[in-house]
Amino acid sequence: MLYGYAGTILEVNLTSGRATKTPLPENLARDYIGGRGFVARLLWERLSWGTNPFDPENLIIIATGPLSGHLVPASGKTHFGTKSPATGGYADSNMGGHFGPALKYAGYDVLLLTGRAPRPTYLFIEDETVELRSAEPWWGQGAITSEEGLKNELGDEFRAITIGPAGENLVRFACISHDFGRQAGRAGVGAVMGSKNLKAIAVKGTGGLPVFDVEGLFKKSREAYEKVKAKPGFTGWTPEGTAGITDWVNEVGAFPTRNFQTSFFPGYKNINGRAVVEHLKITDKGCFCCPTPCGKYGKAKTGLGEVYVEGPEYESIAILGGDCTLGSIEEVAYANYVCDELGLDTISAGGVAAWAMECFEKGIISEEQVGREIRFGDLDSVVYLLEKMAAREGIGDLLAEGVMRASATLGHGSEEFAMHVKGLEWTGYESRNAPGMMLAYMTADIGAHHNRAWALGHDVAGSAASVHDLISAGGSKGKLAKATVAGKAGRVIELQHIRPLFDCLGVCRLQYMELGFEVENYEELFFRVTGRKMSWDELLEVSERVWHLTRAFSIREVEGFGRESDYPPPRFFQEPIPDGPNEGHYLSREELDILLDEYYAGRGWNKDGIPTEETLRRVGLCDVAEQLAQGR
Amino acid sequence: MELRAVHERCSGCRACELACALANFREMNPAKSALGIEGRFPAPGDYRVHLCDQCGACAEACPEDAIALQNEAYLIDPDLCTGCLTCVDACPHGVMYVHASTETPIKCTLCGACAEICPRGAIVMEGGA
């Protein structure tokens, strides 16, 4: 008996409509735990080498973890894996909300999608019943509008994920939406859904989950909630959620501004967490079993109209606010809503818009090409670009490719400030004076994403303090010294195991990261749920295995993948930051090489960033080592 | 004692539903809870907590007199209940639930597990120990 898990993998071939249910393999649960671990292993095993991301043969793997759906703080995480249309390599993107728990109550730990539906379709799951149904009424509709329509038709108790027009139109950074404002945002998972003519999935589950020690778990769960409530961050961090870090990031000179031209946005107090609460918020909106809801749902009124929107959370504030330089929280929220409804990742879409506006400023693209004048700080310009890219109309067809491909097409030096790694646009932390964070972005497996290793706190404070402690201590009051480069790799590697471990377990990391809820609690809860006695260090070994596996996947799938895939764009190693607390700082190419050399050595990878056979064998990936060596 | 909802504090996490099912059935299954959280999205963008206030409408409606007041809570006597579901229709708050695995409807026992777990103070137990 696999306690904690629902026990079944549901595979649906969208071409034939055939649904297959197979028992969850015990060795998969043992060696990969769940969530991101399941995604990584199943992608390696099940995807044919060299599959195009938009081929019907590409897979979408939706995976929960053993703690998903249990009475454990923030157990709503669900992972979406595929071969990324943005990077061509490994992708997993996760979201909170309520979808994963519902999938487990319906009886499934993993939903594996293959093929391509012959017409617009949605997948209906109600416990044992699995059906493909017509999505014609919603094709072309927004992601939020479609979710509302589905719930009106099926009932409020169904949990749904949807894509918007951006996903249908294969925008390479289209997201998957859920619960009117949560997204699996990154790496183009929504575009792969669109390529399969799959508009939505609706799930209702009425079954229970097997628990190793129900009485013990119920007791420990109640204690866990009390411990979270006793943390200073419970009352200090939660009211503003992730948006509450906006001031600190500006004060330490790490806030993306004007397409990362600089790292400080003078108007940051107009778009911070307090502004969200005072000007937008109607209610806190939490994910499943979350005691510290970072979601703030509200209403925003701008010259373009009035909208209901969840957020904006920190990443959207950083990219739509700072990077596109929208000056008021209402404008940021409006642009956030437009992204949500169109099914665009706010981070990538905002980054693409910022890049386009800089190209326009520099005369690299003309008013004639764009169809109008566009400029930083102008909501009309940003919304215009978002709508064009989602529809792939005019200039939008180029922008829908993402900054890596668009800049390669456009040329004229636009590659220098195309802010991405591996083809995925950069998220909300400018890192020219944060070497650990820079290295984290350079080596994150899906591209320039922050959540695999948020090392900025360590760069700034030199400690493993919780985010609440960092914010409480405040940012800098003046100019900052240049950061030390050597010795950063160890902490980055450590974080790359810790944070993705939460993604294997199926719980959110924020109680740990933001509030300092201790990791020992998860050892205990994992034991009561699954019956497996594993120390945190033993769990981390699984996370390390997954890290090497995702690297191996991208080496397998992306031609020439290696060291050159790990550098940031030239802006970050050629241009000193022009103003703000980190004025004058940047990391030279030589300094980036110090970071990479230390990192590869710490990882057991060769100088080109390829895991050695010895390393793969050490972490239990003997078959991966053999297949990579044989080239199949 | 009585359960009271403070709707504006609810963030929709549904920990209450799991705690209810654990306390009353020892099962990790929110479909077997005796309360419900309604998210009203996209507009007006808020939550409503649907709780049993022990009004007794179920007991009045029951043709078998299978529901009776015990220690401030109306409880279903499984020996008398025939599963006719008249009480489910009669409940003015829509908080008597049906599940395929139970022979009787699922009803609040005023155990307080929901109020205890709620991290937001959106469900409170009032007027007693």
Image (cartoon, rainbow, N blue to C red):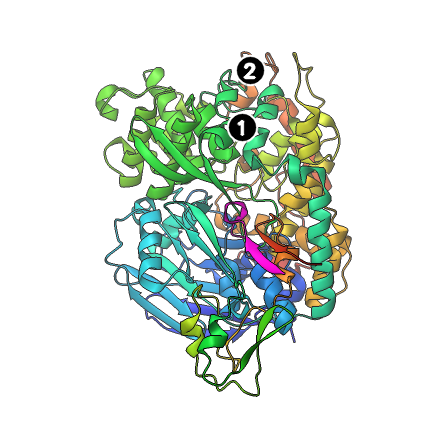
State the residue at coordinates (63%, 68%): B22
Q: Name the spot of residue A581 as percent of width and height, x first.
A: 61, 14
Between residues A61 and A553, which one lies in front from this camera angle?
A61
**Is residue B57 covered in magenta?**
no
Q: Nearer the viewer, mark 2 or mark 1?
A: 1
Q: Is residue A32 at all visible to an observer of this figure?
A: yes
Looking at the rendering, the stretch of residues picked out in magenta corresponds to B1-13
The answer to whether dots 2 and 1 both sit on one chain is yes
Q: Relative to A185, is A387 above or below?
A: above
Task: Name the side, left or right, on which A188 lies relative to A600.
Answer: left
Which residue is found at the position 34% from the left and 48% from the top? Answer: A143
Mark 1 surroundings: few (<14), some (14-19) or many (≥20) residues within 10 A: many
Task: Point out residue A193 in the picture as x, y percentages from the top left corner.
Answer: 37, 54
Q: Chain of mark 1?
A: A
Residue at the (49%, 47%) spot, across then down: A89
Point out residue A84 in the picture as x, y percentages from the top left corner.
45, 48
- Tell me the residue that label 1 is attached to: A274
Q: Residue at x 60, y 42 (%)?
A: A452
- Eyeballing the image, is A457 above or below A374? below
What residue sits right under mark 2 in the picture?
A577
